[in-house]
Amino acid sequence: MQIDHIHFYVEDARETRDWFIQRLGFYSVPPGFCIAPSSDHTHTEAVANGSIYFVFSSALDDSSPVCDFLSAHPPGVVDVAFGVENIEAVMNRAIAQGATVLQPLQTQGPLKWAQISAWGTLTHTLIERSIALPLVDKDSNTFPNITFSRIDHVVLNVAIGDLDRAVSWYETVLGFEPQQMFAIKTDRSGLCSRVMRDPNGRVQVPINEPTSDSSQIQEFLDLNGGAGVQHIAIHTENIVDAIAQLRDAGLSFLKVPASYYDQVRQRGDCVLSESQLTDIEAQQILVDWQSEVPEAVLLQTFTQPVFQQPTFFFELIERHTYRVDDRLHQAQGFGEGNFRALFEAIEREQLKRGSLKS
């Protein structure tokens, strides 16, 4: 299984397309690859970078499903489409486990597809393609050093008390496997998180639930009108250069206090040079590693909210490659230090918005 594409419902599809091109270095592509291209009531645009495809739809009249969605929710992700090798087998399992089928199995040109309801208003389109989506090569020097290789993970926020049920749904319906678990608590709020991953490791879905009314997860749920996708992580091979260029293009990121980097330097087992740490600090990037494998460095940073409501943002992530016993490995999992630092950074934004008491 892998992520085929991700579909957003937005106020203006063309405006959103242009923002992704100008701020994130994506490229406009024809939306013919997706299941729901433009129609009389809905306008659809698409962008891509490498193997990452995003689709944006906006309403042309009141009969559009986008209109119904935006009457109850802010703009955001409505569908995470998974590419599968045997859609009949995947659908048979999903139906046997009680999944709600929104669109039965259909054949459309070189692809087979179906759609099931997931958590909240989120859906999953399942697609088997006989012709794979092409890699989108860059033909411009606007962002010369940015290489987006794939979607690293998609984060789902659910209501308090729903984490175990959501984990069970992904485990039984889609065959995902539980991985890391986090419990983050500060003086003001907290969350619990469980990472779900498909067996081949190409799809990761961390699921968060709040542990207090003041939690940033609860703020998301309140503003989003229920459960939904909080952020998407994009993997890059050179995060320092990528962030520098994206900042120059006007993209805004969460701030990291200088004290964070003092703590990083004090850990003592960091394999990064002082020059590398200086560059990382200059771009406000979080850095973490496993103490038992210090070469497994994880670099992450997070944008400010993309839409008007603070309900959706992007993460950029770089997983260092390292060698053990003449074999190459890539840093896995989610650094707990980075996870907590992100949580605290969002808390600082909550304080600015007045949605969290100091």
Image (cartoon, grey):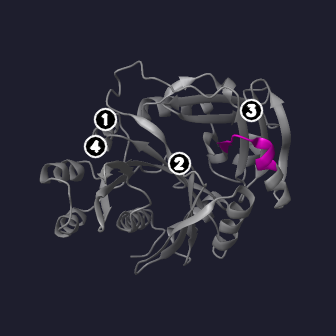
Residues marked 3 and 2 touching at CB (< 8 Å):
no
Q: Secondary structure at mark 4?
A: helix
Q: Which mark is residue 211?
A: none
For marks 4 and 3, the one nearer the N-term is 3
Res 17 quadrant in image = top right
Q: Nearer the viewer, mark 3 or mark 2?
A: 3
Mark 2–mark 4 distance (CA, rounded to whole Å): 27 Å
Tell me which amino acid carries mark 3.
Ala
Q: Secondary structure at mark 3?
A: loop
Mark 4–mark 3 distance (CA, rounded to whole Å): 36 Å
Mark 3–mark 2 distance (CA, rounded to whole Å): 25 Å
Tell me which amino acid carries mark 1.
Gln
Residue at left offset 80%, top offset 27% = 108
Residue neighbourhood size for the residue with mark 4, other residues' Cα within 10 Å, grouped as few (<14), some (14–19), many (≥20): many
Q: Which mark is residue 36?
A: 3
Asked if residue 50 shows in the view, the reply is: yes
Classify the position of the C terminus by image quarter.
bottom left
Find disc 1 in the rendering and name its residue. 245
Q: Position of residue 26 (x, y in %)?
A: 47, 30
